[in-house]
Structures are given as C-alpha cells and as structure tokens.
Image (tube, coloured by chain):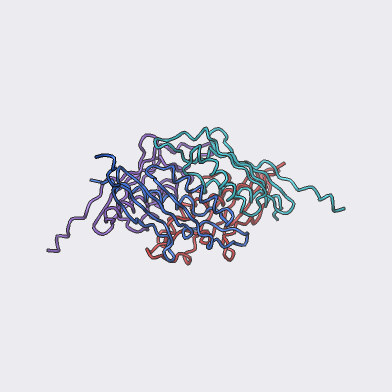
Chain colours: A blue, B purple, C red, D cyan
C-alpha cells in the first residue's frame, strides 16, 4: 500500500519541516552562523532514516538589526538531505525560490543491487 | 524521477514535522486544549497540498505542574492528515507508540478517475 | 537582594521571550489570525504571575506568499502584558519599533494599599 | 518609573523565556549535546544586555528513545545568565526544581563606582 520510496520521501519531508520550525527565529550573526549550521546538522543526523545532511545559512541575508544581530529566517536556509528506507533513497532540498523557502523532493531511486551478491 | 504519490508523501512529512516542532513546548491545560487544537488545525490547513487535518491533544497527559498547567509534549498529539498532489493522495498520522511520538505514512493511492469524464 | 518589582519585571520578560520564540514561524493568514491570537493569549494566561495579556497580530503584514498564506513574524506582534508578584505589578509590551520587534518594560509600581486595611 | 535594575531583570527574563522556547524539542544526544550547548550560548550572547551566559544540558536525562536519540526538554537545562543595563546587573538561572524547569532571578545589584573616578 505504501512503497519504500514513498516512505523515504515521507521521512525527508518530516526532517525538513521539523528543521525549519525548530530553528527559525534563533538569534544568529555571521560570526555564530557556522556553529549553528553544525548544531542543526548534528541534530538532524540523529533522526531515523537520515543518511546525509548539509546545512548552509546565507550570510548575505544576515543584516544586523539595531542591536547588531539577525534572526534565522526561512529564506536563509540552503539544505540538502538524503534519506533511506530499505533500498529506497530520496534527496530533498530546502532553498530559497524567490521569496519563498521552498522544500523540494529532488529525486527518489532504489539503490542498485550490491555487486557482491551474484 | 519522482511520482505524485512520492510528492504527496513528502508533503505529508513536511506538515507533520513542522507541526510538531512549531507547537511542542506551548503552555496548555485541559481548558485551553481545544483552542490550541483549532489553532493548530487552522495553521496546518493553510499550507500547500493539505486536504484535511484533525488534531486531538490527549488531556490525560496534561497533568498540572506546580503552577497548574502543562506543556504541550509530543506524546499528547493525535493527528490525522491527508495530502494531495495531482491525483495522488496520502494519509499520515502522528500518534503515540509507547513512549515515542510516531509519524506514520498510512496509505497512498491515486484518486479514482472522475466518473463524469468518459 | 531582589525586590518584588524586579521579580515582576523578570516574569514579564520571561513571558514575552517565550511567546515570541514559541509562536514565530507559525503559518497564519488574515482568516486564521484571530484563532491564533486567542490561542496565544490562552497559553500565556496559564503561566505564573500573569494578570492580563492582550495579543493583536498585524493583518497588514500578512501578505500572502505564492501559496496564499504568511508566516507569523516578530514584527506582526502587538502584545500588552501585566504581571504581578506580591504587591508589585509591571506592564510590558512587544511591538514594532521600525524594523525591530521591541520588548519594553513600560511601568512597574506597587498596588495601592487595600482600603479595607486601616 | 522603571529602574535600571528592573530593566536588567526584564532583559534576563526575556533571554531565558526565549532560549527555552526556541530550543526545546530539538533532537539531541550525549554526542551532540556539546555542540548544542555552544550554539545556544552563541545565540543568546548576541542579544542586547547579555554579559555572560553558561549553558549545560543534563546528559543523564538524555535516555535514548527507540531510534537512539532524545529530545531537548526543559528539565535538561542548567543555565546561568548575567544581564546589564546601565550600572545595574542581574543574575538569573534556569534549572530543574523537582519536576519543573524553574527560572529564578538570583540577584540584582548596581556595579560599584569605578575607582578611577574620584
């Protein structure tokens, strides 16, 4: 009724939705951006089905407010994520598309059969 | 490369992941639970691909702390969500599975052809 | 070492900081704004030391994105809050000051002696 | 109408309330705890009036769920924060008090006059 590819797509969605709403609003600056990127990656990597995750935050959007810092906004995210369920694998991204932080399911496939198994 | 069913599964994941991390931690009591359920449903319904969403919060888990209220925790959620992309439709749930707030992809299908179109 | 007025000011800060970071990022539209305002007020009212809270969200800032909704941002908040500790009372606000969502401690006083106690 | 000590207490409250609701719910494990502690400290340090902040997360409460990780909960926090407004300085803490994550205003004082100014 539900395939492994669909499950892998579902898991990718969960991680991107979670990441977005967990971290948006956090105070950030160009100096602390890297520490935040690593903390987000570490946190996402703990969750089931995650194979790989890369988070970059757009420093150009971090214009300091009157107190000298910014707030993490959806448009700052550039995330690439790979999930796996069984042999199925999906790649998804969160990145700016004009003025919307778009989550996209880029590709789903089945891992090729292991060449060792003949 | 990606089917509509996979996209609908991805969208369902996004909504559950977002909902969870947006609302967990909010102060809640048995008296305010219903207002919070409606606010969460209203908020989720605004997002793309959402056909239907039903949120119930488990009052039994809302044991008042020393100040007389609780905090919304993942285990309190009982959510059923239907997403649609093209003709594909997925149903997903967030509900307690022992001590884990489990997100499950319950079913994906294609809407039957519209009988009016012969 | 710490006065009741200082404690009431501290409690007011907690509530505004909590409210901001709990709710920022939630999907919202002009149609769902009122339900969200009531849910936020209900949630804040549960917490210790809160006497009164009024939340208004600026509909003018809710310009629909490509999918027809907005995301609750700090600048949309107009909040007035009264806290009380012992006989001390503080009023604090969260409201837009140019492009910054400013939290201000507006006034602290001691409640006048109860006229019945002569 | 409002003293600098009251303002410093208000600022301390804002930071603790914000920190709590920003980070609660984030996936965490004993391995990622330190990276999260540093990210939280970095984020809090950016905000106005913050002189000093120290965040420790209680590893003993991080019992792995069925998928091997935990979720940051209020009870895990041990935070000490110093704020300053003018010459006034407040120290506040967030730490477990039985089963409640208690925020306390520990001390407020005025910095002693600078000995160089005679």
Q: Position of residue D11 (x, y in %)?
A: 64, 51
Q: Position of residue A88 (x, y in %)?
A: 30, 47
In the image, is C8 to the left or to the right of D87?
left
Specify the farthest residue to the right: D118
> Is residue D99 shown above or below A55?
above
Residue drawn at the location 37% of the way across and 63% of the way down: C67
Can residue B43 be spotted in the picture? yes
Residue B72 lies in quadrant? top left
Residue drawn at the location 51% of the way across and 34% of the way down: D61
Residue A60 or D3: which is nearer the viewer?
A60
Q: Position of residue B110 (x, y in %)?
A: 21, 54
In the image, is D54 to the left or to the right of D75?
right
Can residue C114 be spotted in the picture? no
In the image, is C24 to the left or to the right of A114?
right
> Is residue B80 shown above or below B114?
above
Q: Position of residue A118 (x, y in %)?
A: 24, 40
Name the image quarter holding the N terminus of chain D: bottom right
Q: How many marks?
A: 0
Residue C22 or C94: which is nearer the viewer?
C22
In the image, is D16 to the left or to the right of A81?
right
Specify the farthest residue to the left: B118
Residue C47 or B19: which is nearer the viewer?
B19
């Amino acid at each position: 009724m539900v395939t492994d590819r669909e499950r892998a797509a579902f898991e990718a969605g969960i991680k991107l939705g979670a990441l977005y709403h967990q971290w948006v609003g956090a105070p950030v600056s160009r100096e602390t951006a890297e520490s935040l990127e690593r903390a987000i990656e570490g946190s996402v990597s703990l969750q089931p089905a995650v194979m790989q995750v890369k988070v970059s935050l757009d420093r150009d959007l971090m214009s300091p407010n009157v107190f000298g810092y910014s707030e993490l906004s959806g448009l700052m995210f550039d995330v690439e994520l790979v999930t796996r369920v069984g042999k199925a694998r999906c790649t998804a991204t969160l990145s700016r598309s004009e003025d919307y932080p778009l989550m996209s399911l880029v590709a789903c496939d089945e891992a090729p059969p292991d060449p060792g198994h003949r």
